[in-house]
C-alpha cells in the first residue's frame, strides 16, 4: 500500500536540489521513471518469507540486500548526477513502508543508508569529493554507508554528550580509537561515518568531528554483539577502532560540542520520518494479520470472530490509528518539501509526527494482539515479531521527551532554536 498524497510514480525521480556543483558528465545518464514503491512491494514476499528465520537467529538478511541492490535501490536517494534516482522524501517513505510490511529489520537497516544521501543532498555537510565517492560507491559498487555515533556510555549523541571515541592529530592526519554500539548494517557497511571527539587546548570548548573510516582500513573490527528484543536482524553490532591511522582528508566536518548540526533540520527530517514510515509498515502488517485472523477464526461456533462487537471495535480503532499516523507523516513530509514560511515550523511537524506515530502504532499492534488472542504470543506467528519490532523506534531520535521540549520551545520561547545533531 502506498502513502496517500505522496505523488505519482514519476515522483521517484523528482528530487531536491542539493546545491553542489554540476555533476561530472561521466556519471550523468537518463534515469527512467520508476514506481519505486511498487518495485519494493514486488520484493516484499521474499523478504517476508525469510523474516522469521532471521528474527529467530538474529542473523543478517544478506539475501534481502542482494535483492535490493539488484533492483537498483542502493541508489534510490543518490543524486541523478551520480547515477542515482534522486527520489523525493515522499517516495523514500513509501518505499520504507512497503519493505517494513515484510520485514521491519530490513527496512530500518536500509533506512540508515538511504537517509544519508537524502539529507546530504538537501543540506551538504561533507566535502563534495567524499560525497561523490559515497554516491558512486553505492550506485556502481554496492557500497553501503551509515553514521556511527552511539556509545554505551554516551547514549544518544543528540543529548550533547562528549564521545569517548577520540581522533588525535598524528602528523598531517589522525589516529582514531574507540568503540561504537548500534552500528546498524555492520555486516555490510563500507563507509563508516564516525563521530569522535577532537582534542582542544585547555580552556577551549570541546569539539567533535565526523571521520570517514572504510571497511578496508587496518584496525577496524566488528564485534558481533547484537542480540536484541526487537529488530533482531539489523546487524547493529559494536564496531571497534584500534588506533586507526587516517589521512587528513578523512575529517569530514567538525563543530563545537552542542553546536547546531551543519545539516540543519534535514538530518532530523529524513531520520525521524523514515522511522515513522518503518513503524507504520510494521503496524500495517499486524493489522492485516489481525483482519485475516478475524475473518477466518471460528471458535466452537458457526460464527467467525469478526462478528464479535469487541473485535469489530478494535479493528476499527486500529485503522483509525494507522490512518492518523500516515496523515501526520504525510503532513510533515509536505511541510518539509514546501516553500519556507508555513506554520508551525516544518521541523516541529516532524516532531509531532514522530511522537504520535510511534505511540499510535504501538497501540494499534497491541490491539491486533488482543484480536488474535493468546496464540498471538506464539513465535510461529509473525504478529509476535510485529509486537516487538513496532517498539524499536522509541529509542531513536527524536526521543519523545526531546521532541516535546522542542515543541514547547517553539511555542513559548524566542528566538526559534534549530535542532541539534540527529545521529
Image: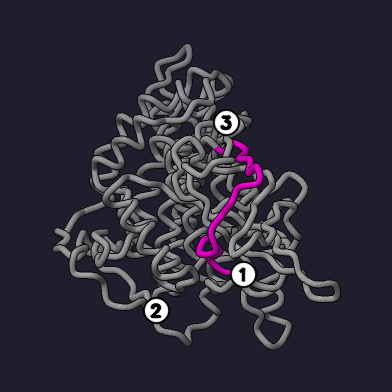
Q: Mark 1 points at which residue?
A: 254
x 45%, y 52%: residue: 277
x 48%, y 35%: residue: 187
Vertical side of 280 occupied by 13: above or below: below
Most frequent secondary structure within the magenta stretch: strand
Nearest the camera: 377 or 149? 149
Vertical side of 399 occupied by 305: above or below: above
Could you tell which of marks 1 and 2 lies nearer the N-terminus?
1
Vertical side of 78 occupied by 111: above or below: above
Residue 310 in view of the camera: no
Q: Around disc 2, counting alpha carbons within 10 Å, would you say few (fewer than 14), some (14 to 19), or many (20 or more)?
A: few
Give the residues drawn in magenta, as a range.
Answer: 236-254
x 65%, y 48%: residue: 395
Total numbered labels placed on residues in the image: 3
Which image quadrant is residue 370 in?
A: top right
Q: Name the residue under label 3.
A: 370
Q: Residue 73 at what x, y percent from top left? A: 30, 48
Q: Name the residue under label 2.
A: 338
Amino acid at each position: 500500500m502506498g502513502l496517500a498524497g505522496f505523488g505519482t510514480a514519476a515522483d521517484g525521480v523528482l528530487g531536491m536540489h542539493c546545491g553542489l556543483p554540476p555533476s561530472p558528465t561521466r556519471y550523468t545518464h537518463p534515469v527512467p521513471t520508476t514506481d519505486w514503491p511498487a518495485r519494493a512491494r514486488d520484493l516484499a514476499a521474499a523478504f517476508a518469507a525469510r523474516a522469521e528465520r532471521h528474527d529467530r537467529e538474529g542473523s543478517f538478511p544478506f539475501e534481502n540486500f542482494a535483492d535490493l541492490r539488484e533492483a537498483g535501490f542502493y541508489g534510490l536517494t543518490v543524486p541523478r548526477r551520480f547515477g542515482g534516482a534522486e527520489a523525493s522524501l515522499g517516495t523514500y517513505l513509501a518505499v520504507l513502508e512497503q519493505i517494513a510490511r515484510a520485514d521491519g529489520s530490513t527496512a530500518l537497516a536500509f533506512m540508515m543508508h538511504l537517509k544519508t544521501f537524502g539529507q546530504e543532498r538537501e543540506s551538504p555537510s561533507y566535502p563534495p569529493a567524499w560525497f561523490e565517492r559515497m554516491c558512486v560507491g553505492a550506485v556502481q559498487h554496492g557500497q553501503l554507508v551509515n553514521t556511527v555515533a552511539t556509545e554505551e556510555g554516551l547514549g544518544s549523541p543528540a543529548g550533547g554528550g562528549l564521545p569517548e571515541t577520540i581522533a588525535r592529530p598524528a602528523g598531517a592526519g589522525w589516529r582514531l580509537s574507540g568503540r561504537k554500539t548500534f552500528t546498524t548494517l555492520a555486516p555490510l557497511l563500507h563507509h563508516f561515518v564516525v563521530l569522535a571527539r577532537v582534542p582542544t587546548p585547555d580552556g577551549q570548548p570541546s569539539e567533535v568531528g565526523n571521520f570517514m573510516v572504510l571497511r578496508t582500513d587496518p584496525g577496524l573490527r566488528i564485534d558481533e554483539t547484537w542480540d536484541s528484543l526487537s529488530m533482531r536482524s539489523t546487524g547493529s553490532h559494536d564496531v571497534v577502532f584500534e588506533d586507526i591511522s587516517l589521512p587528513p582528508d578523512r575529517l569530514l566536518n567538525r563543530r563545537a560540542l552542542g553546536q547546531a548540526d551543519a545539516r540543519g533540520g534535514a538530518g532530523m527530517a529524513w531520520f525521524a520520518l523514515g522511522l515513522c514510515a518503518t513503524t507504520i509498515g510494521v503496524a500495517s502488517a499486524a493489522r492485516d494479520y489481525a483482519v485475516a485472523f478475524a475473518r477466518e477464526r471460528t471458535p466452537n461456533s458457526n460464527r467467525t470472530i469478526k462478528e464479535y462487537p469487541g473485535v469489530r471495535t478494535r479493528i476499527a480503532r486500529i485503522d483509525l490509528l494507522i490512518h492518523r499516523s500516515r496523515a501526520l507523516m504525510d503532513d510533515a513530509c509536505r511541510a518539509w518539501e514546501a516553500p519556507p514560511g508555513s506554520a508551525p515550523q516544518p521541523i516541529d511537524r516532524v516532531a509531532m509526527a514522530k511522537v504520535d506515530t510511534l505511540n499510535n502504532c504501538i497501540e494499534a499492534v497491541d490491539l491486533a494482539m488482543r484480536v488474535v488472542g493468546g496464540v498471538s504470543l506464539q513465535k510461529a506467528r509473525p504478529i509476535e515479531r510485529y509486537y516487538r519490532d513496532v517498539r524499536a523506534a522509541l529509542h531513536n531520535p527524536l526521543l519523545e521527551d526531546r521532541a516535546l521540549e522542542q515543541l514547547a520551545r517553539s511555542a513559548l520561547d524566542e528566538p526559534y532554536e534549530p535542532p541539534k545533531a540527529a545521529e
